[in-house]
Image (cartoon, rainbow, N blue to C red):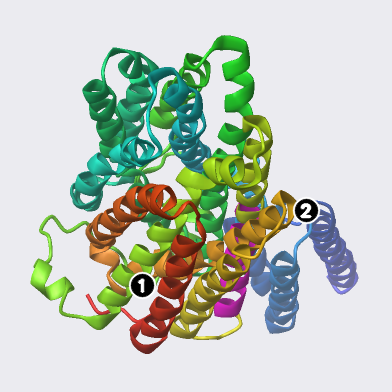
Amino acid sequence: MAVVTPTKSTSLVPYSSRLSNSQLNLVSFRKTHLRFRSQLHTRAIITWEKSQHGKEKTRRADQWLRNGEDKKATGGGLTRCRAEGVERGFLVGGGCEGWLLGVPERLKVVVLVAFVMCLCNADRVVMSVSIVPLAVRHGWSTSFLGIVQSSFLWGYVFSSVIGGALVDRYGGKRVMAWGVAVWSMATLLTPWAADHSIGMLLATRAIFGLAEGVALPSMNTLLSRWFPNNERATAVGISMAGFHLGNVVSLLLTPILMSMTGVSGPFTLFSSLGLLWLTIWAYGVTNDPRESNDISKTELRLIQSGKSEPLENKKQLPPLRQLLSKLPAWAIIFANVTNNWGYFVLLSWMPVYFKTVFNVNLKQAAWFSAIPWGMMALSGYIAGAISDSLIKAGYSITLVRKIMQSIGFIGPGVLLLCLNFAKTADVAAIFMTVALSLSSFSQAGFLLNMQDIAPQYAGFLHGITNSVGTVAAIISTIGTGYFVQWLGSFQAFLTVTAALYFVTTIFWNLYATGERIF
């Protein structure tokens, strides 16, 4: 027994050691090459180590687990399968759940919004260019051109408030879809209406404006749902870049298409693109990221964590008196009035301005008119990126909104005064380009401020401010025609517009805020 016992003891211990080493080697191999360990298997290893080798081996296994977790956190192998790109920014691809499609869902949403905003403005500008040959064909006076141009705004002024309220209740997706369907059909029918009667033309343009009035509230509300606060200005900048590029596309393509297919050609093209967009929009977008089946969990967490508090879809509207009792709301209203006043004067009269003042032909006027809008699209995106960067750097939302809005009004005001002294079309185009480029900074000012002060009722507030701003746009569009016919010059009206920019800037800096008040 004395001989047998040592033999048994010495044979079992080495065997046990060899088994333990083999097992640990296997664990090490799997850790090195796969970087993956299931929780259940890990617990089994710890239990086995405790039973065989006691506390010392347990501490070694625990240390191994901590090292493994550290390596998992820093990346490598399969454990990095998470939406890191989404966390860094929405212009970068997503993680596990997003690799199949390659881009975050919110980027797809903003691209579709930017495209439809491009069509929205392109459909408006078609009339600004085609009205020149239509006026020659039908013998319209200069003052009557202002009435035709403003007829779009007659419907627009009514749909802004109603559309904004509908957006708050039903979401941006459905309201935008109906708007695009109606305005695309109205665009298609415009040349036919012009050839039949003045009344039919004005009615068609009013219906067109009625449908387009829902576009901006739908865009603003939809993007506020899909983007965290520190990306919202960039998203709006991208969407409004599409809006301004619509000017460029329409100003350049419309004369070419009219020379090839007649006046109806550009109307047919843009209305067809709108109906085609609808088929993609219906299945590719949801009102809220929480309703999407394609969004990754990580991207959804990023969006939700980037908001100050969850937005609830309240069915009731706030009292109008309550909204109008706050000076920050009036700051937004006055800013919208001034923005629309200057914007629609330039949008509606720029081709006529270059033709009348500098005697350039229609195609040249289109080029001179298109360049400023193209730069405005680029500067709008830059303004959004700067705004988001300032907020991420720790500056208050109030300060950022005031800075952006001040640039967006003081800059155009100064340059419109300089425009009175332009002697050539080239110099005038430079002044207009810089003026419109700087005015796009307003997108990161009053346009975003509606979501800041009243996130629950932003659509309704947008509708109110847009309606008042549209009345101002009607006055400025018609007034420009009468001023030009009366005085024979654009200078007086440009000076009035510049003064309005300066006064509104003072009011904005006194009373605007980035804090929530509703």
Q: Where is 507 relative to 347, above or below?
A: below
Which residue in the protein does label 2 denote?
77
Q: Where is 293 relative to 185, above or below?
A: below
Tell me which residue sits at (47%, 15%) in the image: 264
Classify residue 390 as left or right of residue 60. left
Classify residue 300 as left or right of residue 216. right
**Picture quadrant of residue 175:** top left
Which residue in the protein does label 1 denote?
452
Q: Residue furthest bottom?
A: 510
Range of the magenta residues? Answer: 377-392
Question: Upstream in the sequence, badge 2 or badge 1?
Answer: 2
Identify residue type, mark 1: Asp
Classify residue 217 as left or right of residue 279. left
Identify residue type, mark 2: Gly
Q: Secondary structure at mark 2?
A: helix
Out of 495 and 485, give the one closest to the viewer: 485
Tell me which residue sits at (52%, 51%) in the image: 240
**Picture quadrant of residue 327:** bottom left
Dot 1 alpha-carbon crowd within 10 angstroms: few under 14, some 14 to 19, many 20 or more: many
Classify residue 85 as left or right of residue 442. right
Q: Where is 61 relative to 356, above or below?
A: below
x then y, percent, for residue 441: 55, 67
Out of 265 and 363, give the one closest to the viewer: 363
